[in-house]
Amino acid sequence: MRIAPRTESFIGSLIAAGAMVYAVHLITKDYTSLAAITLPRGGPMEICALGVVLWLHGKWRSATRVRD
């Protein structure tokens, strides 16, 4: 089964956006001050990176054509 490049880009952007929302949720869960904010270790950042890579791959597939 092949996924269309546009669909791949769309799914990648949804994955990246969802991971960013989750990361912001984790960062602000116990918010006390701006100085206490730290990036979460593991989890949402890797998922966001995976979504960005998937989005880029879909965009690359849209921009290139294979010659027969």
Image (cartoon, rainbow, N blue to C red):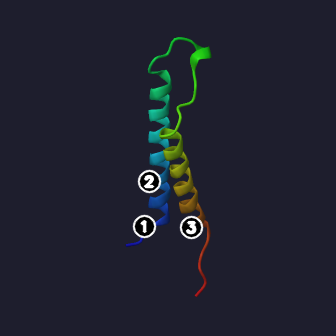
Which residue is painted at 47% across and 60% down in the image?
A: 8
x%, y% of residue 56?
A: 58, 57
x%, y% of residue 16?
A: 50, 45
> Alpha carbon of mark 1 to alpha carbon of mark 3: how far?
11 Å
Instruction: Mark 3 or mark 2: name the one nearer the start of the chain.
Output: 2
Which residue is painted at 46% across and 17% down in the image?
A: 30
How many residues crowd mark 1 within 10 Å: few (<14), some (14–19), many (20+)? few
For residue 59, above or below residue 30: below
> Alpha carbon of mark 3 to alpha carbon of mark 2: how far?
14 Å
Amino acid at dot 1: Ile
Q: Which label number is shown at residue 11?
A: 2
Instruction: Mark 2 or mark 1: name the one nearer the start of the chain.
Output: 1
- Judging depth in this view, the residue of 1 and 67 nearest the camera is 1
Quarter of the image where the N terminus is located: bottom left
Instruction: Mark 1 or mark 3: name the one nearer the start of the chain.
Output: 1
Quarter of the image where the C terminus is located: bottom right
Left or right: 46 as drawn, with respect to 2: right
> Alpha carbon of mark 2 to alpha carbon of mark 1: how far?
10 Å
**Residue topped by disc 1:** 3
Which residue is painted at 49% across and 33% down in the image?
A: 23
Amino acid at dot 2: Ile
Amino acid at dot 3: Arg
**Residue topped by disc 3:** 61
* Residues at marks 2 and 1 touching, judged by CB atoms closer than 8 Å: yes
* Residues at marks 3 and 2 touching, judged by CB atoms closer than 8 Å: no
x%, y% of residue 4?
A: 45, 67
For residue 29, above or below residue 1: above
